[in-house]
Structures are given as C-alpha cells and as structure tokens.
Image (cartoon, rainbow, N blue to C red):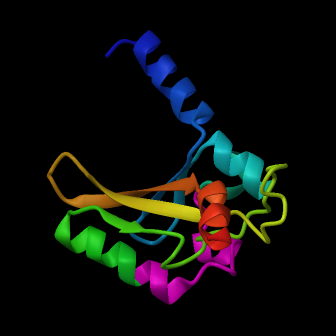
Amino acid sequence: MDIREFHWLMNIVQNLDVGLVVLDRDFKIQVWNGFMESHSGRFTHEVRDGNLFELFPEVDRKWLERKANMVFKLNNRAFSTWEQKPYLLRFSNYRPITGAAPHMFQNLTLVPLADFGGQVSHIAIMIYDVTDEAMLASQQ
C-alpha cells in the first residue's frame, strides 16, 4: 500500500457515518473517528490513550468488559442491538424526524484486531445510529 492509498483509507475512516473506536486490552482509546468526535463533542487528541471508562463514566463497564473479553479470548466478533442495550455511549439524538427520541439508539459490532503474531491485542467497536429503526419499531 502506498501513501496515497493510506491517505484515502484514513479519509474514509474519518468520514464514515458509523462510529469507530479502537481499544487496547486496557480499554485505552487508540482510534476515534469523525463520527465519534461529532457526537461526543470530544476530539481525538483529547481521548487518545485515555481509558474509555474514565473518560465516559456512563458506559456500562461490567457489560462492555464481559462482551470485549469474549472477543479478545475467542478472536470472534460480537454484536449488540439497541433492543438488548439501547446505547454504548449516550449521544443526543440529532435527527429532525426522530427528534422525539431521548437519545441515539445504537447497534454495535465488536471486531477482534490481531497483531502480527496472531494475538488479539485490540478491538474495534463500530457504532451504528439506528434511532430511526428504533422509533419505528416503538410505534408499532
């Protein structure tokens, strides 16, 4: 991969309409994309190398540790839907149509990230805004 391709990849990651957080085994934030910056109000330089639970005490620590530890140990993806847990990080709902929602409803995918030796050293958490779907489901 040349530097141009790397630059393009970084642009894509920063502009995804999905939250992307990469955590190490100590739950220190290594990657925090543009979605996360805009919804949390915290920039990458403010959170990088900070402990997720210290920076965001509202995160359900026991739940996330249990979920993440399964990903670390089994080297397998894990998922969570808004029906199981409405959100990981409580972000405001910013959509005009679903403005009545108390917060952003989120689906999560936790992905193992292995080092060169094949050991899972980090996990990526993808956060999807599913507020529209949650509000539609609640109306039925």
Report the residue at 72% width, 48% height from top: 37
Q: Quarter of the image containing the C terminus?
A: bottom right
Q: Is residue 92 above or below residue 118?
A: below
Can residue 105 be seen here? The reply is no
Report the residue at 66% width, 77% height from top: 54
Q: Nearer the viewer, residue 132 or 107?
A: 132
Report the residue at 54% width, 84% height from top: 61
Residue 115, position in %: x, y? Answer: 24, 50
Q: Is residue 16 left or right of residue 64?
A: right
Residue 136, position in %: x, y? Answer: 64, 62
Q: Is residue 83 above or below residue 136?
A: below
| Residue 52 is covered by the magenta coloring | yes
Q: Is residue 8 left or right of residue 14?
A: left
Residue 92, position in %: x, y? Answer: 79, 62
Can residue 35 be seen here? The reply is yes
| Residue 83 is covered by the magenta coloring | no
Q: Which residues are magenta?
A: 49-65
Q: Is residue 52 left or right of residue 114?
A: right
Q: Is residue 2 above or below residue 112?
A: above
Q: Nearer the viewer, residue 81 or 28?
A: 81
Q: Nearer the viewer, residue 104 or 89?
A: 104
Q: Is residue 89 above or below residue 45?
A: below
Residue 122, position in %: x, y? Answer: 36, 59
Residue found farthest to the bottom = 62
Residue found farthest to the left = 117
Q: Quarter of the image containing the N terminus?
A: top left
Q: Which of the 4 quarters of the picture holds residue 75? A: bottom left
